[in-house]
Image: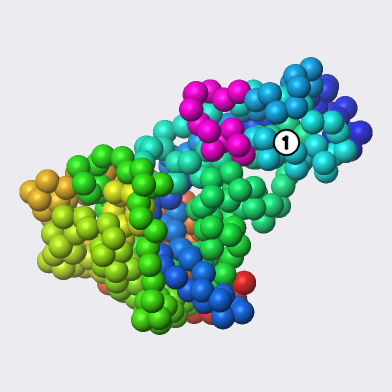
């Protein structure tokens, strides 16, 4: 931290106090075992990011406290507490300052145990708050490394909304798949009655050579879905990945979920591979989309599957967000996404631009790049 930064923070009364924020996700589009650039098997995943719920952290440095003397509120957030210790060690070393203690306070609205990345969000927000207290902004790769050390396996929430194949137990990117996921509208729900899942209690999956070949095929298909902004291909990847995960998760409602997707015209489904949230994916350009989504919610209710929130992977118009079929919709999970010409009337937002409720942004074919 420079002398100017120290003076500025002291003048505003914020020296030694930092804040951080991290968002959540809605489970995975793809998760399995893949080959890295050296041909080595590696567990990896591609998450479905979601704006809305998140964690905010506030960290106060206590120079008078002995090193390692940290507290966290709410009590019991042990992963975030480990992240604080790791982040303080990292930041103190970078700033050439002595180690100290401190206090972490977390607030947020991410449901715990549903596979939405609540612990990763806590950890990332905590690391960012500690860095801010030192006047630093740690690179995403460093945040990823600290996050994996704090919780053994981490979601790639520190990397932003770009779709990446992420080695969750190693904290590294196996591949950057492109700029943004294809445009889809997600009708969220919870399986298993919406109860929390202890992810550490799940048995570790065992994968053979056939699994590796199958997941590599899905990886290539997802790369093509991103490059061509194709919702249908995205749905195929999500559904097949979820189906393969059923060998371990065994959700009793899964077949009903897939059937609902089929007769409401959804392009596919996605699930949390270590939780209970799930989503039905709809092409935003599909004719009669509001009716399809209303029927989807009705059928979920009939099957005893609680519908939760509706969100998108692109920026919807105000009309789309507030229409009768979309109450409670969240804003986009990522940056504006290219798409195909609409097959329904285009809506316009309050500034008069073509809105994504009727037409996703103009199609620009992109190629995924290796990372």
**Helix, strand or loop under label 1:** helix
Instruction: Evaluate whether residue 364 shows in this view.
Output: no
Q: What range is drawn magenta here?
A: 71-83
Residue at image position (73%, 31%) is: 133
Q: How is the image coloured?
A: rainbow
Please say if 236 is above or below 183.
below
- Is 357 displayed left or right of 367 in the figure? left
Looking at this view, name the residue that lies furthest to the left: 302
- Is 366 displayed left or right of 209 in the figure? right
Disc 1: which residue: 88
Instruction: Evaluate whether residue 92 shows in this view.
Output: yes
Indicate the quadrant containing the N terminus: top left, top right, bottom left or bottom right: top right
Q: Position of residue 223 (x, y in %)?
A: 47, 76
Q: Is residue 73 magenta?
A: yes
Q: Position of residue 99 (x, y in %)?
A: 79, 31
Looking at this view, name the residue that lies furthest to the right: 3
Q: Position of residue 324 (x, y in %)?
A: 22, 46
Residue at image position (50%, 23%) is: 75
Residue at image position (35%, 51%) is: 202
Please say if 99 is above or below 287.
above
Task: Report which quarter residue 211 is drawn in.
Answer: bottom left
Viewer-proximal residue, 317 or 18? 18
Residue at image position (65%, 25%) is: 70
Q: Few, some or many C-alpha atoms within 10 Å of disc 1 (few <14, some 14-19, many ≥20)?
A: many
Number of on-image labels: 1
Q: Position of residue 102 (x, y in %)?
A: 69, 24
Indicate the quadrant containing the C terminus: top left, top right, bottom left or bottom right: bottom right
Q: Is residue 315 magenta?
A: no
- Is 92 displayed left or right of 109 in the figure? right
């Amino acid at each position: 931290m420079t002398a100017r930064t120290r003076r500025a923070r002291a003048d505003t009364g914020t020296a030694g106090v930092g804040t951080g924020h991290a968002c959540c996700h809605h489970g995975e589009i793809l998760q399995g075992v893949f080959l890295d650039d050296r041909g080595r098997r590696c567990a990896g995943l591609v998450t479905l990011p979601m704006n809305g719920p998140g964690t905010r952290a506030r960290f106060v440095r206590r120079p008078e406290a002995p090193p390692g003397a940290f507290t966290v509120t709410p009590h019991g957030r042990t992963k975030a507490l480990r992240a604080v210790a790791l982040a303080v060690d990292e930041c103190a070393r970078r700033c050439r300052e002595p180690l100290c203690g401190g206090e972490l306070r977390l607030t947020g609205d991410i449901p715990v145990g549903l596979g939405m990345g609540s612990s990763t969000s806590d950890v990332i927000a905590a690391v960012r708050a500690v860095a801010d207290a030192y006047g630093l902004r740690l690179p995403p790769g460093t945040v990823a490394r600290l996050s994996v050390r704090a919780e053994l396996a981490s979601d790639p929430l520190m990397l932003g909304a770009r779709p990446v194949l992420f080695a969750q137990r190693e904290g590294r990117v196996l591949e950057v798949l492109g700029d943004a996921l294809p445009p889809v509208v997600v009708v969220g729900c919870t399986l298993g009655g919406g109860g929390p899942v202890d992810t550490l209690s799940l048995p570790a999956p065992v994968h053979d050579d056939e699994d590796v070949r199958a997941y590599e095929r899905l990886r290539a298909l997802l790369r093509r879905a991103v490059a061509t902004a194709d919702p249908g291909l995205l749905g195929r990847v999500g559904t097949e990945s979820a189906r393969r995960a059923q060998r371990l998760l065994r959700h009793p409602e899964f077949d009903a979920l897939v059937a609902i997707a089929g007769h409401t015209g959804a392009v596919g489904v996605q699930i949390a591979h270590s939780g209970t949230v799930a989503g039905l994916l709809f092409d935003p350009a599909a004719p009669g989309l509001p009716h399809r989504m209303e029927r989807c919610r009705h059928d979920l209710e009939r099957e005893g599957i609680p519908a939760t929130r509706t969100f998108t992977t692109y920026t919807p118009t105000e009309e789309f967000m507030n229409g009768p079929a979309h109450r409670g919709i969240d804003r986009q999970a990522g940056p504006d996404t290219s798409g195909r010409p609409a097959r329904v009337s285009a809506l316009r937002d309050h500034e008069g631009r073509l809105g994504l409720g009727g037409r996703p942004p103009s199609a620009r074919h992109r190629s995924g790049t290796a990372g």
